Image: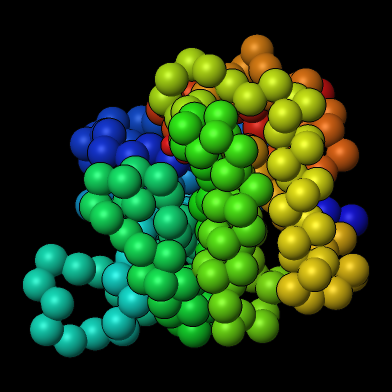
Amino acid sequence: MRTPMIAGNWKLHKTLDEAVNLVGALKTKVKDVDNVEILVAPPFTAISMLATKLAGSNIKIGAQNCYFEPSGAFTGELSAPLLKDAGCDYVIVGHSERRQIFGESIEMINNKVKAVLEAGLSVILCIGETLEERESGEMYDILTAQVKEGLAGVTDMERVVIAYEPVWAIGTGKTASSEQAQEVHSFVRGLVQGLYTPEIAAATRILYGGSVKPGNVDELMAQSDVDGALVGGASLVAEDFARIVKFE
Ligand code: PEP
């Protein structure tokens, strides 16, 4: 009942030419895939160009961040309505790099989630614990706060995807084992059930992120509560990302 989703987070990579080349190659490689929702989240500068290039294809476009106000005197920021206008379907919110490097609070992340939904877009809400939080036994409290406070005031869960990204596994080459991923995904689904209904929990997609590669995607996707992947490094190479999209 949950359509798998494979999303690529390009972070701060790819000039316009490189971005066009990457989606050109990707489009050909995944053109026959009709059972997976495919998303690329390029840098802001490439969004509208890629929206043109990907029109009519099976690849959607997401943004990696947004501000929570729709417009106004916020120099340097981009809003959800502007991202929609540029061709986005999704916005990634609360990535650990935003939390850690840019100091985003749970309250700010919650405001962004609501702003994205208000604009009519879908959101990928990222959550995840640091190694220290895992080892000190605080992991489940941290994840609970990230889910509950991140979703505070949200009623439209149909347009919410959650991405569990253990911070210690992002860009490090260390992947959570498929058992570790399943354990947390099942816990998160239970949190969604507690906040909403069993039906909503059963319909909510929970992606795994953290060093997903062609070599480990199949095992991760075989877990019953892993509904897809948010992919960083491997999404920058068409062949690798296409193989992840075509997980077995
Ligand atoms: C990410 O940035 O969301 C991510 C999971 O990165 P990587 O796949 O490179 O670990």
Relative to the observer, which residue lies in front, 134 or 209? Answer: 134
Q: In which quarter of the image is residue 221?
A: top right
Is residue 35 visible in the rendered structure shown here?
no
Residue at 75% over, 25% down: 178
Residue 207's x, y, as percent? 66, 45
Q: Quick check: 16 left or right of 109? A: left
Q: In which quarter of the image is residue 109?
A: bottom left
Q: In which quarter of the image is residue 161?
A: bottom right
Residue 80 in the image: above or below residue 133: below
Residue 242's x, y, as percent? 60, 27
Residue at 67% over, 80% down: 156
Is residue 193 visible in the rendered structure shown here?
yes
Relative to the observer, which residue lies in front, 224 or 196? Answer: 196
**In which quadrant will I find the N terminus?**
bottom right
Relative to the observer, which residue lies in front, 183 or 142? Answer: 142
Relative to the observer, which residue lies in front, 215 or 162? Answer: 162
